[in-house]
Image: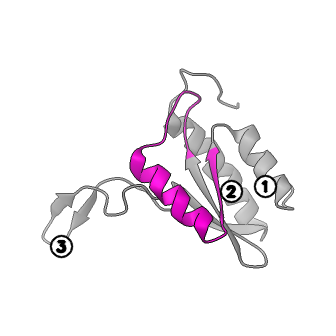
Amino acid sequence: MSYAGPHILEKHIQAELIWMLRMMKNHGKLDFERINLGPVIRHGGVWASNPMAGWADLMIWIHGGQIIWWELKRKIGRQSEDQKEFQRRVEKMGQKYYLVRSLVQGQQILTEHGIAA
C-alpha cells in the first residue's frame, strides 16, 4: 500500500521509502543512511536535541560516488529554516537535494539517477 494525501503522517512515508531503499541496497544498487533521527542520549544519559538540526532525513550513495539527499515531508509539510539552509549548502557543493513526499516520487528520483526501482 502506498501512502498519499495530506492526512498521511511523515513516518508512514518514511517507512515505505526506507523499505524500498533497503531492498535496493540488498541488491547492490545503492547505499543509504538515516541522518536526522531526532533527540539522542549523550554521555551520562542526558537527552539532547538533535545535534544535526536541519540535515536531510536520508543520505543516499549512488554508484559512481554521487550522493543525493532526501528530506521527507508529507504532502502539506514545509521545510524549517535550518533545512532550507542545509539545502543551500548541499546544492552549493553540487549535490542534489530533494523534498520527497511519496514512494512514487522517490522511485521517480532514483530512475532519473539511473537506478530502476
- Mark 1, other Cα within 10 Å: few <14 / some 14–19 / many ≥20: some
Task: Decide which of tag 2 and tag 1 comes sooner along the chain.
Answer: 2
> Marks 3 and 1, Cα distance to the nearest angstrom?
38 Å
Foreground tag (3 vs 1): 1
Image position of 96 (left or right of 80): right
Closer-to-camera residue (17/51)? 51
Could you tell me which residue is drawn at 72 percent across and 66 percent down?
A: 26
Foreground tag (2 vs 1): 1
> Marks 2 and 1, Cα distance to the nearest angstrom?
10 Å
Task: Decide which of tag 3 and tag 1 comes sooner along the chain.
Answer: 3
Viewer can see residue 29:
yes
Q: Which residues are magenta?
A: 72-99
Secondary structure of the residue carrying tag 1 is helix
- Mark 3, other Cα within 10 Å: few <14 / some 14–19 / many ≥20: few
Image position of 14 (left or right of 50): right
Q: Quadrant of the N terminus?
A: top right
Was residue 80 drawn as part of the magenta stretch in this picture? yes
Residue 111 locus on image (x, y percent): 84, 54
Q: Identity of the amino acid at label 3? A: His
The disc label shown at residue 78, or none: none
The disc label shown at residue 43, or none: 3
Could you tell me which residue is drawn at 57 percent across and 44 percent down?
A: 15
Q: Identity of the amino acid at label 1? A: Leu
Could you tell me which residue is drawn at 51 percent across and 54 percent down?
A: 57
CB contact under 8 Å: marks 2 and 1: no
Secondary structure of the residue carrying tag 2 is helix
Viewer can see residue 117:
no
The disc label shown at residue 110, or none: 1
User: Residue 49 sits in which quadrant?
Assistant: bottom left
List the residue tagged with mark 2.
Answer: 21
